Structure formats: C-alpha cells, structure tokens
Amino acid sequence: MDKLGKQKHVIIPVNAVQKPAEVNLQEQKQEETTEMTVRKSEKAKMEKIVQGMNDFLKPSNTHLKFEFHDELEEYYVTMIDDETQEVIREIPSKKLLDMYAAMTDYLGILVDKKI
C-alpha cells in the first residue's frame, strides 16, 4: 500500500511465471547433469588410483583390474598375472558378490515386493 492507503498492483507477464512442472523438470535436468559430472570425476580418480597401483605392482608382473558388478552396482578388484593372464585374486570374490546379490533378491521377493 502507498501513503494514501491505496494498493499498488504489479503486473507480471504470464510467460515469466513458470509452472511447477517446468521447474521440476529443470531441477531434475540440473541434478542429472551434476550427477553425471560427479560420476565422471569419480571414474577419473579411480582410474588414476588404479594406474598408480599398477605401476607399484609392475615389478611383480601383476596388474589390477576394477570390474563392475551389475546386480549390486559395486566395484570389485581383480589381480591378474601379466604373463599367464590368470586371475590371481578377486577382492571381494565375485562368487561372494553373486551370492550376496541373490540373497538380496530373494529377500526382496519376501519383504519388499507387494503380491
């Protein structure tokens, strides 16, 4: 209100006001792009660490390989002999991760899913 008690009106163009759905879409797109950049930076850091470990293990003729377990969406480490390409060790073991994934799947059937 002004000094005389009259209300002042502000005119806002209709196209300047965003709908809630548009705002949510914009926020979702921004979150997705930031998530992608974070994943890329984490992957770059992981590759740098792996390269450092491989350089450290070079005298022993072994190298490390980080593999992604699809069901658990987790990484595990595989130590490989350079000469024979044989897997020396997996940390944690892929069999153990497979069993854990199967248990969580069965537990999900019993508890999480509606019938």
Image (cartoon, rainbow, N blue to C red):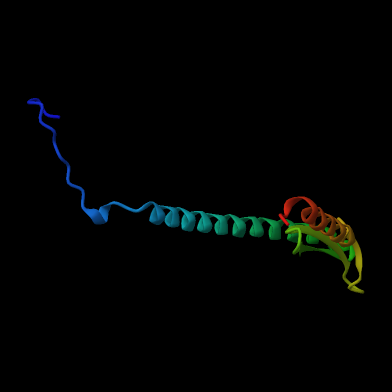
In this view of the protein, which residue sits in the foreground, 34 or 115?
115
Give the quadrant of residue 74. bottom right
Q: Is residue 40 left or right of residue 78?
A: left
Position of 87 with respect to 105 (left or right) is right
**Residue at (77%, 50%) from the top-left corner?**
111
Give the residue drawn at x 35%, y 53%.
19
Between 52 and 93, the one nearer to me in the picture: 93
Which quadrant, please, contains the C terminus? bottom right
Q: Nearer the viewer, residue 100 or 44?
A: 100
The residue lying at 47 percent from left, 55 percent from top is 30
- The image position of residue 79, as x and y in percent, is 86, 62
Figure quadrant of residue 57: bottom right
Q: Is residue 9 above or below residue 19?
A: above
Quadrant housing residue 113? bottom right
Task: Residue lying at the far left in this picture: please name it.
Answer: 4
Residue 61: percent from left, percent from top: 89, 66
Q: How many marks?
A: 0
In this view, the residue farthest toward the bottom is 84
Percent x, y of residue 108? 77, 54
Residue 33 percent across, percent down from the top left: 51, 58
Residue at the front extreme of this rendering? 115
Q: Which image quarter is the N terminus in?
A: top left
Work out whether 23 lies above or below 68.
Answer: above
Residue at 91%, 71% in the rendered image: 86
